[in-house]
Amino acid sequence: MNNRTYGQNCGLARALDILGDRWTLLVLRDLGMGPRRYKDLAAGLPGIGTNLLASRLKGLEEAGLIERTVLPPPAPVAAYALTSAGEELRPVLGQLAAWGFRHGAPFDAEDMTRLEWLIQGLFARIAPEAADRFGGVVQFSVGGESAWIGPAADGVRLRPGQAPTLPKISLNTDVPTLLAVVNNDIDLADAFESGAITVEGNDGELESFISAFSPARIG
Amino acid sequence: MNNRTYGQNCGLARALDILGDRWTLLVLRDLGMGPRRYKDLAAGLPGIGTNLLASRLKGLEEAGLIERTVLPPPAPVAAYALTSAGEELRPVLGQLAAWGFRHGAPFDAEDMTRLEWLIQGLFARIAPEAADRFGGVVQFSVGGESAWIGPAADGVRLRPGQAPTLPKISLNTDVPTLLAVVNNDIDLADAFESGAITVEGNDGELESFISAFSPARIG
DNA sequence: CCGAATCCGGCATGATACTG
DNA sequence: CAGTATCATGCCGGATTCGG
């Protein structure tokens, strides 16, 4: 909070003293997918206003959740990255996102969409463990964008771009299809059968993928 | 949000559209310890202002997180209670509180204190599973207040007042001592040895309690 | 061009008074 | 007791401007 505190000896209130301002958690969400520059953060948070973004970054840095770093040699520019305190927040944000997907407003084609959010929604619709259940990297290519999700030491990793390791399965589709699947308007298996989602390369893992992600196959 | 949305197809943004306003999560925290009347909520949230509390309650009711109920016969008055959607948020709030206790400002005697928050802090300092590890109801009496924590079907239950079942252990202390223990300024085992915390009734479970809650004994 | 700081209108917030 | 009405304050959002 902008030095405005709830003044309660409560863990939740203490957390909200740091995180409760508008935009703050969304900044951390974006930084959770890797270090980001100021302009990239601004581009991913339409409406935030440059003063607010600067203010949030400063507050988060003072609170010890983020730090200014320099990106590795290919592009040695200043950027912001999560500290360990910020990293520890990531599973909480994931659970909150899962709740929001289940109980919040349905995803809407009018709203801004980023591929990573849809993928997280796809996993949240079933269970956070769906990625573990599949047990390998899933590479998505949707429109011009790409992103991947895969198991990691601390849980699940979700990143934009191409996975650094060979994916267990690679999928192609478009945003409207993925929105419909995430909103449960069409069944995942049906989307494969109709060709709305296609498998690139070897499709031997398709059955495994569907069984891990399709709610109809669970339980 | 007061009909102000982030406009992003993201679970976290969708959750914050509902929960992101000031005070909202604290209202849900209080309702997480059982149904509450308007005036009890107001008393537990100093500074909220009656209009904001009314506004938050209305918003949460429209979002389907809470509902108006009538308390059972002993006191048949109107009250607010969590719906299932609201209940599903409780583990998330618990995790957020644990994070806030670990990484937020330390607890301060100047700030408002409620016994339940300190107990949650005590558990959060070790791990959310500390209550499960102890495996029974712990009854606290601190100053004039009392509260208890114990295992429940959906995780851990933390409530003010006297536990409805026989506690496995009953503890007496005062707020400054509990604040110090929660902030790790004094060791839990030392607090027992010095008599700052006393065991009421049978103290056969004291060793078990300390081993479950004292970080020095873990790992 | 990137990373902010500044300025200002509008709206959420916070405190009090007031009413069913 | 449970809110509603009202108003001052200050944060938020958007545009512009400035320094590196």
Image (spheres, coloured by chain):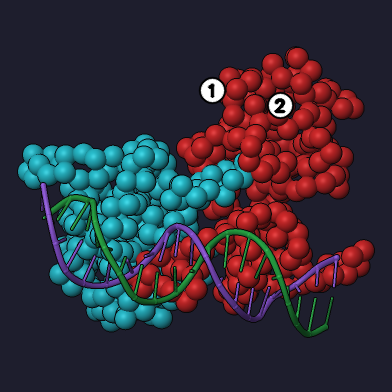
Chain colours: A red, B cyan, C purple, D green
Q: Secondary structure at mark 1?
A: loop
Above or below for B192 versus B48:
below
For the residues labelled 2 and 1, the Cα–Cα distance comes to 25 Å
x, y (%) of residue B40? Answer: 20, 57
Q: Residues within 10 Å of mark 2 (few under 14, many from 20)?
A: some
Label 2 marks a residue whose chain is A
Picture residue at 26% right of the left edge, 79% below the top: B196
Label 1 marks a residue whose chain is A
Q: Amino acid at mark 1?
A: Gly
Specify the quadrant of the image occupied by residue B119.
bottom left
Specify the quadrant of the image occupied by residue A31.
bottom right
Asked whether A43 or A160 is in front, the reply is: A43
Task: Residue B165: tell me if it is visible.
Answer: no
Q: Are marks 2 and 1 on the same chain?
A: yes
Asked whether A214 or A218 is in front, the reply is: A214
x, y (%) of residue D3? Answer: 22, 51
Asked whether A160 or D19 is in front, the reply is: D19
Name the N-terminal-most of marks 2 and 1: 2
What number is the disc on residue A177? 2
Q: Secondary structure at mark 2?
A: helix
What number is the disc on residue A219? 1
